[in-house]
Structures are given as structure tokens and as C-alpha cells.
Image (spheres, coloured by chain):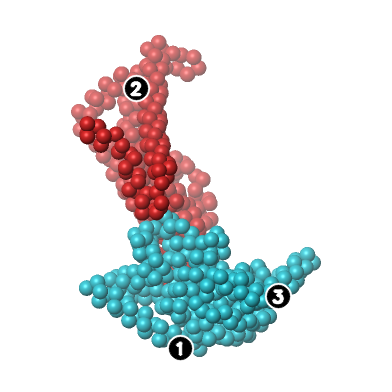
Chain colours: A cyan, B red
Amino acid sequence: MNTSVVSIQHNLLQKHRQDSKERGHVSIDSVGISFGNGPDRNIAVHETSLNIEPGEFVCILGPSGCGKSTLLNSVAGYVKPTTGRVLVDNAEITGPGPDRGMVFQQYSLLPWKTVLENIAFGPRLAGHSAAECHSIARTFLAMIGLSKMEKRYPGELSGGMQQRVGIARALANYPSVLLMDEPFGALDAQTRLMMQESLLDIWSEFGTTVLFVTHDVDEAIFLADRILIMSASPGTVIADLKVELERPRQSDMATSDLFISLKRTCLQYIRAESMKAFEQRECE
Amino acid sequence: MSYALANKKPEDNAPESIQAPIKQESTATGSTSVSNNERMANRMSIALKSKQTQSIVVGILSLCGGILLWHLATLYNFNFFINFENIPSPLNVADAFIGHLAEPVFYTHVFVSIRRILIAYGMAVLLGVAIGLAVGRSRLARAAVLPYIEVIRPIPAVAWIPLAILMWPTEESSIIYITFLGALFPIILNTIHGVEQTPEVMIRAALSLGANKLQVFWHVVLPAALPSIATGLAIGMGVSWFSLLAGEIISGQYGIGYFTWDAYSLINYPDIVVGMLVIGGLGTLSTYLIKVITRPALRWKELQR
């Protein structure tokens, strides 16, 4: 009985892996986002266009306040672009939906649901039976290595564990895109490195498109296939760098020549943009 | 002999077995530090328990002291600014209370009051939580309801008595109305507060997991508001007793408030205090019951580290 449930899950995952080669194409089509009207109008994102291929791991890197989270939120559907449009697999985004899993920087698990219920929440909303929801949730709990924690409440877990559950919760809907908004920003440096490695493990198993916002250059290089650097406000993509480091990524790659030269390039862009942002603030 | 040996080192054996899976190299110093920790924890829990007993003992002593002062004041007819000459002594009150326990009419008074509380409080909970949720979630509901709350809330329930008697067909319904009003506002205000506290990021997370508005409300907003709603329910219970008594003193033929006021009119002074103490006891008991009933829904909060 139990083994059959696991094998069904395995098939679902298998099917998802095949699909993910065609699913998860993100197209941001001359998107501009501004808030407010008249003289108070604040342009957060300025005319940005980009294409992300299915299965790609893309990091959006930029100084704080450059609009990178706003851009991500427009893909998530929380923010409606003022101009242009966002397409995922050729369908225009009109609001949040389970096809785009979201992981936040703040802890966003529902504290009154157990770990298992939190992960099963998406499948439950999708109308799966209780037994199915639990078996899906258990598959993902095993994937993040927290099977023993299923009956715990989020408040009982460490920050790193909570974020792993957050990732599992987003993946339990088999989304075509995983959106991550500085998910490890609140964690300590050690936990952070561990989480980056385990995210890459999960991603290699799951094979979905990832759009990952960060202001940490090392994190972006370590994780991404592609790094998009955003300028200071109004934000727009000013550089599109390929990360040619081989996979699976190892932590000692951080000292390789390729890593260091990429880091130098990123830092130059970021420094120039931070200076510009700083001067803009001084002028105001 | 072997018994003595086995008895000698129980705490040195136990922690080692606990420690083994955590640390591979469990050294002698490691195990002693754990057993020290355990001893410390034991000592702390003993200290905590003795502190609790101490508090209880001090509480009881303080209460006895108060009753003794009351007794002395009535015994010597204390009369300096406040007057104890007509105040019944604690013994008289106890006598009267025991006497009433044998009378069916006393139970009728208590029963009538409890029934009024159940009806009025029940309606206040249903309406208060519903209004609070609506105001907390909808801008329009807020705009429509908030002016009423601002105007009516500061009016004490006692001030409603004349109008309530004019408005409602029976005395019973006017008393229930006053009791209901007392409980309503704390429940509404705490529910609104709870709804407003819902973290936006949790709502966004639920939307991204495929929840519609109703599901967001049911799975996110309502549970997030529950702790605050529970507080409102407990406060509302206290205020409803307060309002009930005000209503019963002015009108009615039964009820513990009527009993108290009637005792004053009939110059039956010990019964005044009996009535007061019964009111206090029922109020405390019912608030405690509300806390016990709402506790299971808040279990997740207690487990937070």
C-alpha cells in the first residue's frame, strides 16, 4: 500500500521532469512598473525585456532598492506592470497562481498548520484527496530531508528548516517556475551556504525554471546559469552574464579563476550602480 | 552490595546513552557536563515549584488577612470616614450563604442570570466576530460600521438602561440587550485588531499556492486573528457580567443582581455581600471557561520558540 503511493509520486515527479523541458518559459516583454501618480510618481522598473528558457536557473542581482523584487513580483502576479506584459509559457500573467511557486525572504509558512499541512496546502487547494496530498507532501519532505519534522509547527523549526519547508511547499504544486525573493537573506552565513547547496540538489532533481533575486554576488555566481544585473532606480537589466562553471557546483569553485573573474565583473557593475543610487539619494 | 552499586551511578549512565547519537566522541567531561545540566534543570524546576507554592501560600495568607481586617472592623464598629457599623461580618455572610444553599429560589436567581448571559453573550459572539471580520477585511464595511462603533462604544451599558426599557417589549429582553451591548464591543474591536494583524506575506503565499479569496480568508485571515479574537471573547465575558448586573439591579424579578439590590431594599445586609461574591465567582469562572475552550485553537502559538 505504502510502496504504491511512493511509486505514484515517483511517476508524477518523472512526468514533471519530462514536462519541465518544455514548461517554464518566462518572457518579460518591455515591462515598466511605477507607483503613484503625478509628481510623486516613482518608477521602480524601467522598460525591461528578457527571456528565460525552460529549466534555466537565473539570478537577478542588483543593489538594494533597484526594483529587482518588484520585477519578480510582476512575474508572481502581485504587481501589475504599468506597461508591457509578462508571459509564462505564452500565457499572460494576470494574478498570482499555483503555476508559479514563490519563496519569500520573511518566514511565510502558516504557523497554525503543521509542516506536513503546510506542504500539502497547495495540493489540497488544487483539489487532490487528503491521502494524495499527504503522499505528495511526504515526497517533498523527504526531498528536503525533514521527514521527521512533519508533525511539528513552523514555530518549532530553525530559520533554515523553515525556508526549506517553504521551498518544498512551493514545489508541491509542481510549478513551471520557482520564484525566490532573497530566500536566504535572513539566514546566518553558515546556514546560507548549506541552503544554497541543498537548493541546487533539489533543483537538479526537480528541474524547474528558477528566478532568484539576491544582492549577494557570491550567491548569484554559485547558483545561477545566468546572472542578470539590474541598475539602480529606475531599475532595468544592464548586464546578462553566463556562468560557465560546471555542474554540480562545488563549494571550492569559489576560489577558481572563472569564479573570481566573474565576481570582479559583477562587483564593478554593482559598485557603479550603488554609487549612482547613492548620489541620487543625496540629490533628493 | 550490587544494589548499592546500581543505585550509586544512575545519573552517570543515563546521559551517556542520550549523548551517544549526538556526539561520536563522548568523553568523560562531556557526560558530566550533561548530567550537570540535568541536575541544574532539576534544581531549577524544584526552585520553580517551590516559588509557585510560595506564591500560593502568600496569596492565601493575604486573603485571610483581608478577611480578618474586615472581621475586626465589623466587630469594633469601625467608623472613621468609612463606616462599618452596618456592614455584615464575614461570619454573618458565610451563615447567610450556607442558608441560601438550601433555598430553591436562590438557585433560580443564579440560573436566570446564567441564562441571560448565555443568550446575550452568544449573540454578541456571533455578531461581534462577524462584524469584526467584515470590518477588518473590507474597506466599505469599515467605512459603514466604524462611525457607529466610535459613537456607541464609549456609552456605558448602565446609560442604556432607560432607553432599553422604553425600546424593548419585556424587562427580560431589555436586560439581555444591555448585557449583549456590553459584550459586543470588546469582541468587535479585538476581532478587527486580529484581522489587521494578518501578515501580508502569508496572504501572498496562499494566493501563490492557488487559494481564492474565500480560501485565503478561511486558511489565513481567520486563524491569524484567532488569538486576538480569543482575548476579545474573554474580555467580553467579563464586561457582559458587569452589564448584566447593572440591568438586573434596575429591573426584573430574578437574577443575582436583583437578589443583591433586593437585599439592600429589605435591609438584609449579609445577602448584599453574598450576592456580590456570587457575581464575582461566576464572572471569574465563566472567563476561565472561555480561556479553556479557546486554548486548543491556539496550541500552535504555545509551541513557538
**Closest to the observer: B254 or B272?**
B272
- Element type at marker 2? helix
Count of number-bearing discs: 3
Residue A22: numbered disc = 1
Residue located at (38% from left, 22% from top):
B61
Work out whether B78 lies above or below B141. above
Residue A98's x, y, as percent? 44, 76
Residue located at (64% from left, 76% from top):
A257
**Same-chain status of marks 3 and 1:** yes
Q: Residues within 10 Å of mark 3 (few under 14, many from 20)?
A: some
Mark 3 or mark 1, which has the lower sequence index?
1
In three-dimensional space, the C-alpha distance between marks 3 and 2, rounded to whole angstroms, equals 87 Å
Res B234 → quadrant: top left
Q: Find disc 3 in the rendering and name its residue.
A: A269
Nearer the camera: disc 1 or disc 2: 1
In three-dimensional space, the C-alpha distance between marks 1 and 2, rounded to whole angstroms, equals 88 Å
**Same-chain status of marks 3 and 2:** no
Residue B168: numbered disc = none
Work out whether A241 lies above or below B266. below
Q: Find disc 2 in the rendering and name its residue.
A: B269
Tell me which amino acid carries mark 1: Glu
**Closest to the observer: A224 or B116?**
A224
